[in-house]
Amino acid sequence: MLRNLHVKNLALIDEAEVDFKEGLNILTGETGAGKSIIIGSINLALGEKIPKEMLRDQEDNAFVELIFEVTDKGTVAALEEMDIFPEEDQIILSRRIANGRSIAKINGESVPVSKVREVSSLLIDIHGQHEHQSLLKKQYHLQILDEYAKDALGDLKEQLEKVYGEYQEILRELNKNSLDEESRMRELSLLEYEIHEIEEAGLTVGEDETLEEAYKKQANGRKILEALGMAQQYLSQQNASASELLSCALRELNSISGYDAALRQMAEEVSEIDSLLGDLNREVADYLDGEEFDEEKYRQMEQRLDELNHLKSKYGHSISDILNSLEDKSKKAEQLRNFEEYQAKLQQELTEKQTCMESMCEKISEIRRKYAGKLTEAVRAHLMDLNFLDVRFQMQFEKRDSIRSDGWDDVEFVIAMNPGERLKSLGKVASGGELSRIMLALKTVLAENDRIETLIFDEIDAGISGRTAQAVSEKLLLISGGHQIICITHLPQIAAMADAHFCIEKSAQNETTISTIRRLKESESVAELARMLGGVRITDTVMQSAREMRELAQNTKDNRI
């Protein structure tokens, strides 16, 4: 679960730290106080894009950190498969934004943002303000069903996606090779010319590098020989050469070496230098004896390098690339020579893949239909709790004309909210408030089927009030029995259920507007409920109503335990 949030220099927040609790964590505050910034901060730490408006004016550095407590063995195992290991049962996700760039870390180690998203998908689920609108898109319905049935589906979908990719590749190859006889022969002729050109070159891997080194040496042969000749003269072949002068110095030192140990040491060192110089002179002489500029050899090297560079310009950046190109061209030429057989082979492979996909789609569809009944019945039960008094909720299946990477099922949730009504698409009958409750019911069912510990609801109460608001609050309380819930709300009925109530407030300090967040004591929580109930004027009656609401909520919680 999410234990701690630390935010610094982000939007209206100068610096804030929040310790979340188990159960139902409620965040309330005036409109514009900065409630959305809290969710935005969490999203940033989880790897979402950084809106420019989130960065504070006159601040170069922003920082968000989330500390999760992870004890579920399945979650720990899934994290370890990603090479992420909890330290003292904690995973720390952080993100620092400076000068338009961000650095993401997990347990202090820098990682790509994509890695943060992958890890966070195991730890937290966020329901944004407008996510219920996604229920209007049919493709989202299939995602929900597959999430619900993921254990039963196992690896089937991944296997189907793999086979579908192979099928598409064969199909592309077939279409690419749909040539008439004239085009086929023209392409074959070009391939045979290119194959002959490469084979005639008799390439050897690494030949170009060896040849370039030898060519460089040959190209500078005259300069090398001239320089070595002069060096030889300075070392040994002219008056006052290094060898002659060194011998003189050694002779003088030897004549006095018997008088002092230090002088003997000097004589030995010069003797060693004289020996090394002798070796060097022999090496120079040997090199000069063995080297001469060969005009013919130089010309042959130059021609061979031109040939290799010409082939590189056509077929690859290296000899290995050219040889790989030769292999590909040889295969392609063989296919064109035996065109009908190759096409028949591709067609057979395509048919086999099609048969395999159909078999997999049938299994996937059977599992989906089975779990669709369970899902919709569970959702319907929760909808009745959420003040849908006489509701039918089902999933309709149709078979697509063609198979896709996710199968052949075209599914859609349909609903009838009044007796005698026929089932219709959600978008045709559900208002914004009704969509919010349907989404909450779906989230409730999915949460029961998921090991993600922390769920965040950003204004799940949109468009509802009265008895329905009370039903939503009780549903959130139900979910919080097995999950940590963090909920931003405008409704006192929901806020009254809080196990931990936080208030977000906006104030002016040093001519700057800042937002702060703090956990409310019991008396402060009642006062905040009164503000939500009464608006500007908080009368004794409103305060009494707030106390009663809080007491009733506590009784509801006690009765659930």
Image (spheres, helix red, strand yellow):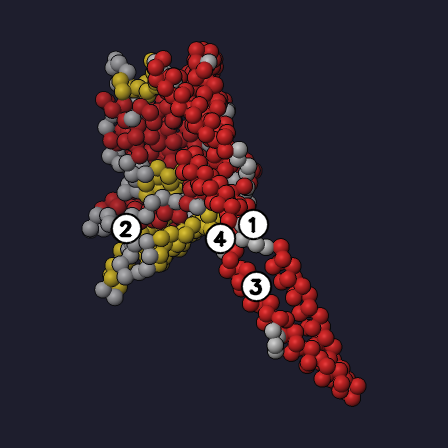
Alpha-carbon distance for marks 4 and 1?
Answer: 66 Å
For the residue marked with disc 1, what is the amino acid? Glu
For the residue marked with disc 3, what is the amino acid? Leu
Alpha-carbon distance for marks 4 and 2?
Answer: 59 Å
Which of the 4 image quadrants contains residue 100?
Answer: bottom left
Above or below 87: residue 72:
above
Disc nearer the start of the sequence (4/3): 4
Total marks in image? 4
Query: Residue reaching furthest left?
Result: 536
Instruction: Report x, y in % for residue 451.
Output: 48, 34
Disc nearer the start of the sequence (4/1): 1
Tell me the number on the disc at residue 88.
1
- Eye-nearest disc, 4 or 2: 4
Residue behind mark 3: 228
Disc nearer the start of the sequence (3/1): 1
Question: 10 Å neighbourhood of mark 2: few (<14), some, or many (≥20)?
Answer: few
Residue behind mark 4: 219
Instruction: Report x, y in % for residue 222.
Output: 51, 58
Residue behind mark 2: 52
For the residue marked with disc 2, what is the amino acid? Lys
Q: Residue at horizontal 35%, vertical 49%?
A: 41
Alpha-carbon distance for marks 4 and 3?
Answer: 16 Å
